[in-house]
Every structure is written in structure tokens, then in C-alpha cells.
């Protein structure tokens, strides 16, 4: 099979692992920077050009599109879909997941529990907005934030009002969310492929922080998850239409709460902690759905 990996940086761990896993199973792989692509959009012969040349057909495309390039990156992915390439995650599913407000609304519609979350536009709504999520302490998040950036814990009502007003002064869209104190700065990252959680780790924030992201210096360990957590993680990924997803869950007194669903989960932390070959699992999933009956040319 011929595969493309859409990424701005082919040297990062996840992209290299996916390329190596695909090549070990006999596939041809090309790294493609989506921002260097341009498209001919027509009904007869839709095309993708890359650095001066028209690209041929790819059996499958693996999107590793960063948050900052979501709009153009998903447009390029959509053009590959129009040309008949199998996407590991569809463009529409990625855009659902990247819009935090939309994704939470979709999860809520399916009855998936999450921290109480408020969203508003007018500064006049601040008092009621804070009360809506149970008062301080609370978490304020930029809708466009990622990897813990743009996430602030406001420990008092006065601090919450100041943070909310500051973000609104920048015309930023924000979510105000209930703080789950009993989680103690920990969350569970479930790696979902299809209808199965293939790996799970518990992430713990570094001392003095409440964000458990490994990019922020957090620690991680392999963890056993409950059947309820497993079902919720799979349901959350399926609700957004994602074949592969990182589903972040908080363990609260009232049960597991979905905090976020990541459409392009990093592999370095979860592979390093669990010792599992998740990249090969992802390539195998592509084989089964893009080319049923495919047999690797070399052992994998």
C-alpha cells in the first residue's frame, strides 16, 4: 500500500514511529507538509499538488495535523478523501474534536458524563457563569488551547472573575469548568483504536501544577481501567467519529468524567510507559479497513 503522513514535522516521535511501522509491514510512506500542498478542486479530476508536482493516489492518509493548522490541514485531508484515499481519522471528525465547545456538546447529547462546563460571551454573565459550575475553585480554558496551554486554575471567586475578564478582554473564546479536586492533578489517557482501548496510562501533574500533560512536565504510569471507563472512552471516540483517539478521563467521586478527546494523540509517552507497539496497531487498523485481506510483505 501507498501511504501519506500529513505532518509539518516528520522528525517528531509519533510520525517516525508510524513511518517505520508502515515500512516494516511493506508499505511505501511519504511525509507531506499540508501547508505546502495546494489543490485543484473540480468534479472531473480533483488534484493535490505538492511543491510543484501533482501527487499520485494514496491508498491511505494518516493525519498528524497540529491545532494551529487545523483549518488548512483538514482541507487538504478532505481533498485526499475526495480522491478516494482512506483517512485514519476523517477530516470532519478532526474538526469536531478540535472545537472544544462543539465536542462537549456532542458528548453531552450522548449522555457522556463530563465536568460541569459553562460558555458565555458577555462580561455581564460572569457572576452567573461562575455559580453555574459550582463556584471557585474552577478552571478557565481557551477554546483553542492545547497541551495544557491556555488552561488556568482560579482558586478564588475574585481570581476567577479576573481571569475571565482578562481572557474576554482579548476577545478569546473560553470555557469555564468545574474543578475536580478529588482527581488530585491526575487523569487517565485512554488510547482508542476502533472500538477498543488498546492502552491506558495515568498522568500526574508535576508538583505545584494541576495540568497532567506530559508536555508540561507531568509523570505517567501504566494503569488498569475499569469496564465503565473503557466503555466511556470508546463511546466518546465514536461519538466524534474518530477511529483513533486519546480520550482523557478524570476519576471523580460521581464516576469517570470525560475531559477531552484528542484527534491526534502523541505516541511517545504512552508507548514508552506501556511498552506497547501502538504505531503498528494503527497501521494494522488501516490495512484492515483500507485494504481488507492485505498481508504484510515482511514480518511485523
Image (cartoon, helix red, strand yellow):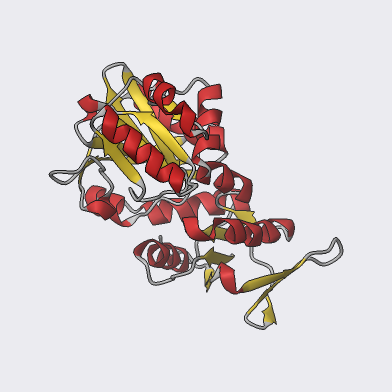
Report the residue at 57% width, 39% height from top.
241
Image quadrant for the C terminus? bottom left
**Residue furthest to the front:** 124
Residue 71 located left or right of residue 57? left
Between 238 and 182, the one lying in front of the other is: 182
**Could you tell me residue 156's position as x and y percent?**
24, 29
**Residue furthest to the right:** 44
**Residue furthest to the bottom:** 52
Between 97 and 163, the one lying in front of the other is: 163
Report the residue at 53% width, 59% height from top.
62
Tell me, yes or no, if residue 137 can be seen here.
Answer: no
Residue 136 located left or right of residue 282? left
Image quadrant for the N terminus? bottom right
Q: Is residue 25 above or below residue 120?
A: below
Residue 57 located left or right of residue 246? right
Tell me, yes or no, if residue 8 can be seen here.
Answer: yes
**Residue furthest to the left:** 207
Between 253 and 177, the one lying in front of the other is: 177
Report the residue at 60% width, 49% height from top.
90
Determine which quarter of the picture holds residue 18. bottom left
**Could you tell me residue 142's position as x and y percent?**
42, 44
Report the residue at 52% width, 33% height from top.
122
Query: How many tags in the picture?
Result: 0
Determine which quarter of the picture holds residue 12. bottom left
Between 123 and 271, the one lying in front of the other is: 123
Q: Is residue 290 above or below residue 195?
A: below
**Could you tell me residue 38's position as x and y percent?**
68, 71
Q: Is residue 147 above or below residue 18?
A: above
**Could you tell me residue 118's position as x and y percent?**
45, 28
Amino acid at each position: 500500500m501507498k501511504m501519506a503522513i500529513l505532518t509539518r514535522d516528520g522528525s517528531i516521535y509519533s510520525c517516525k514511529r508510524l513511518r517505520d511501522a508502515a515500512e516494516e509491514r511493506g508499505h511505501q510512506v511519504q511525509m507531506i507538509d499540508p501547508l505546502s500542498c495546494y489543490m485543484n478542486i473540480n468534479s472531473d479530476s480533483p488534484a493535490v499538488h505538492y511543491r510543484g508536482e501533482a501527487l499520485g493516489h494514496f491508498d491511505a492518509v494518516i493525519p498528524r495535523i497540529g491545532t494551529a493548522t487545523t483549518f488548512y490541514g483538514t482541507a487538504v485531508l478532505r481533498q485526499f478523501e475526495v480522491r478516494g484515499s482512506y483517512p485514519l481519522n476523517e477530516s470532519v471528525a478532526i474538526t469536531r474534536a478540535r472545537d472544544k465547545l462543539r465536542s462537549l456538546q456532542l458528548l453531552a447529547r450522548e449522555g457522556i458524563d463530563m465536568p460541569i462546563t459553562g460558555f458565555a460571551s458577555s462580561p455581564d454573565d460572569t457572576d452567573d457563569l461562575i455559580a453555574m459550575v459550582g463556584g471557585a475553585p474552577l478552571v478557565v480554558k481557551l477554546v483553542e488551547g492545547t497541551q495544557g496551554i491556555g488552561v488556568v486554575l482560579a482558586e478564588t471567586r475574585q481570581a476567577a472573575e479576573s481571569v475571565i475578564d482578562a481572557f474576554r478582554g482579548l476577545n478569546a473564546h473560553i470555557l469555564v469548568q468545574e474543578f475536580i479536586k478529588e482527581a488530585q492533578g491526575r487523569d487517565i489517557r485512554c488510547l482508542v483504536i476502533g472500538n477498543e482501548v488498546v492502552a491506558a496510562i495515568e498522568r500526574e501533574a508535576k508538583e505545584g501544577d494541576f495540568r497532567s500533560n506530559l508536555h508540561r512536565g507531568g509523570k505517567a504510569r501504566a494503569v488498569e481501567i475499569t469496564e465503565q471507563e473503557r466503555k466511556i472512552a470508546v463511546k466518546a471516540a465514536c461519538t466524534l467519529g474518530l477511529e483513533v483517539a486519546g480520550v482523557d478521563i478524570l476519576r471523580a467521586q460521581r464516576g469517570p468524567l470525560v475531559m477531552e478527546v484528542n484527534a491526534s494523540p502523541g505516541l511517545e509517552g504512552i508507548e514508552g510507559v506501556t511498552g506497547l507497539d501502538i504505531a503498528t496497531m494503527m497501521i494494522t487498523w488501516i490495512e484492515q479497513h483500507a485494504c481488507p485481506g492485505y498481508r504484510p510483505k515482511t514480518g511485523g
